[in-house]
Amino acid sequence: MNLLYNSTRNSDIAVTASEAILKGLAADGGLFVPERIPKLDVTMDQLKGMSYQETAYAVMKQFLTDFTEEELKHCIDSAYDSKFDTEVIAPLVKVEDTYHLELFHGATIAFKDMALSILPHLLTTAAKKNHVTNEIVILTATSGDTGKAALAGFADVPGTKIIVFYPKGGVSRVQELQMVTQKGENTSVVAIHGNFDNAQSGVKEIFEDAGFAKELADAGYQFSSANSINIGRLVPQVVYYVYAYAKLLENEEIASGEAINVTVPTGNFGNILAAYYAKQMGVPIAKLICASNENKVLFDFFRTGVYDKNREFILTSSPSMDILISSNLERLIYTIAGQDAEKTADLMVQLREKGSYEITPEMRERLADFEGGFATEEETKEAIHDTFAKTGYVMDTHTAVAAYVCAQYRKESGDGRKCLVASTASPYKFIHSVMTAIDEKYASADEFDLVDELSRISGTEIPKAIEEIRNADIRHTRECDAAEMKQAVREILGV
Ligand SMILES: *Cc1c(COP(=O)(O)O)cnc(C)c1O
């Protein structure tokens, strides 16, 4: 049966999966959501024996119903190949009493690769299916990891151009170097004077500007998004939760039907929403634990039912979670509002106009699957330090936020269910913060000198992504004010 996608702000808008992927965002500024979450049509017993690629097909075919088997399998096989440094794609590592699902074995060593290595293939397939002749321009705002993963995914993909905006001073040195050294004739990188929310709002404004879209269409271009507002990002992320559960079962870590908890270090709410979708597809997940850093707007939301972004924006050691407007939360709001687009649109107007909104008591009741927690900078460091001291395992700062929140939840709730932690980045990517947490003596060291030291103390190989940027040339130096993003796009495209 064909599954359609509605806008969270207008249920009359209903498009196919390929159209939703092409558009990225609905014309009314809403996000595309599947009209219902499909169930898995294979059993856990069948899933147990499947490879990552086979699992991806079993999950994604349920969502992307207008893709043929051949098309979808081609996308999957082109994405999950030797770009990953392990055949299992997403390994599970048991660290004390939790299971770390390592999602950082792709080209840019953060979990964004899980979706962004397949999105270009989904998008170019969708363009063909819909007879699009325009060149597709990917516009992306990044808090650090999406940008590089999207650049790597789209570099030199025929029929596409990609423009990435990142907050100057708001990303780690490794992240910045990864982006500004990006090769590919169709890639552009712009540093904006502002924070991630400014970059994200700027991109959304450009998307919603119908006049600009018309102008671009006349010049043979159309926009799409590689941000997690694109459903083509979200669907591939559901896969690894299904896969992880099946592997826990296969390895006899859990019994058949046993429910587990999942803790996700959260920024834009994409990754944890994918876990929620996996639960609705039929994976036995009890609690979805949303872990925030000191920008704990989501923690406050789950505790009070009030979403309030009017607060200081804090730069932390987990920059990919330094976000005050979690875009994907809109999809959850729509669900708990009983798929009421009018209600959702109204709350989003309040968010835009006064920076806050409050959900109703009925909506709060539907949030029972979620728990919120947060870790301060000090607690994040402590988690990295103590885990290394006890086990020799080195976590990155984002994963450490989740590991801390997971342990704290277990202690406070007495909930003894086994817990999966989404491990979202390699420690090499945030090496300065990670090494300083392990030992203060590294505080004054150069990031690149620390690479060999981390390899030595953790017994892990230096990832290719790090070796590559050590000597690469800087190719992108463009900067602009947050208010000038549209002008930057004009200059890059020559329109
Ligand atoms: C993007 C990112 C996150 C946050 O994920 P969301 O889907 O935006 O909630 C967490 N950790 C790392 C390393 C990331 O790159």
Image (tube, rainbow, N blue to C red):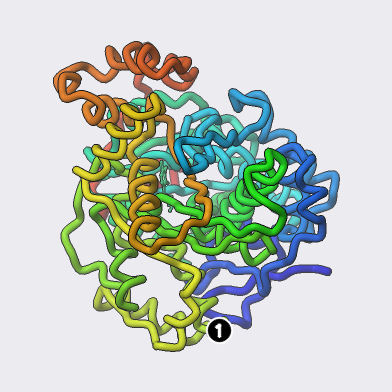
How packed mark 1 is, by other alpha carbons closer than 10 Å (few <14, some 14-19, many 20 or more), is some
Using residue 438 as the reference point, say whether residue 79 is left or right of it.
right
**Relative to 34, residue 134 above or below:** above
* SS under mark 1: loop
Image position of 376 with respect to 472: above or below: below
Q: Is residue 450 above or below residue 223?
A: above
Looking at the image, which is closer to me, 148 or 256? 256
Residue 214 shows in this picture? no
The structure residue drawn at horizontal position 36% and vertical position 44%, both measured from the top left corner, is 165
Which quarter of the figure has residue 274?
Answer: bottom right
Classify residue 476 by image quadrant: top left
Instruction: Return the residue at label 1.
Output: 338
Quarter-wise, where is residue 80 in the image?
top right
Q: Look at 32% across and 64% down and name the residue there.
A: 299
Residue 58 visible somewhere in the drawing: yes
Which residue is found at the position 22% from the left and 27% from the top?
A: 436
- Locate residue 459, reporting x and y percent: 44, 15
Please tell me which residue is depicted at 46% across the width and 17% down the height of the picture: 460
> Which residue type does callout 1 highlight?
Gly
Q: Is residue 199 left or right of residue 137?
A: left
Q: Position of residue 82 (x, y in %)?
A: 66, 24
Pick the quarter of the image with the N terminus: bottom right
